[in-house]
Amino acid sequence: FLNLERTRDIVSALNGYKILILGNHDRSRGRSWWLKAGFNEVSEYPIVYKDFFFLSHEPMYMNKHMPYVNVHGHIHGQKYEGNNHFNICVEHWDYTPLSFSQITDRVVVKE
């Protein structure tokens, strides 16, 4: 909800390669605005990462036979976690970004 300059300041303070998966409040600005704000990639759709993580803005339907863990945000008031979901909504993590190693340490890997 900030202007481009302030958003760019925040994004530039984050480490690493930054991918934004557009959510309900992000779409009105369009991909080019977010790229100008400093994201390396902007996706309108969920993406598969490292053949195991299904990254999306909000939780997606995942049945027990799917080989993915859905890493998502959007759900602010509750954890909404299970064997197939991991909620990274900032309110649950003290407004601190998580690394993928932190996520994989908490995810139950099915073999």
Image (cartoon, rainbow, N blue to C red):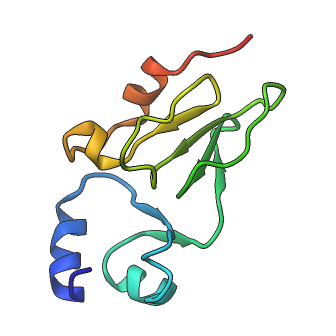
Residue 45, compared with residue 80, is above or below; it is: below
Q: Is residue 3 found left or right of 49 in the rendered image? A: left
Give me the residue at 64% from left, 58% from top. 46
Which residue is drawn at the image coordinates 77% and 29% (left, top)?
67
In the displayed image of the protein, which residue is found farthest to the front? 77
Vertical relation: 101 (above or below) 28: above
Query: Picture quarter containing residue 35?
Result: bottom left
Residue at horizontal 50 percent and vertical 69 percent from the top = 23
The C terminus is located in which quarter? Answer: top right
Relative image position of residue 95 (x, y in whole percent): 21, 47
Camera-nearest residue between 60 and 32: 60
The residue sitting at the right extreme is 65
The residue that appears at 84% across and 26% down in the rendered structure is 65
View extreme (top): residue: 111
Task: Answer left or right for 49 relative to 72.
Answer: right
Left or right, residue 44 beside residue 67: left
Picture coordinates of residue 74 (x, y %)? 45, 55
Residue 86 vertical position relative to residue 45 in the rendered view, above or below: above
User: 78 or 64: nearer the eye?
Assistant: 78
Residue 6 located left or right of residue 78: left
| Image location of residue 79, percent across then percent down | 42, 35
Tally of numbered tags: 0
The quarter of the picture where the N terminus appears is bottom left
Does 32 sit above or below residue 101? Answer: below
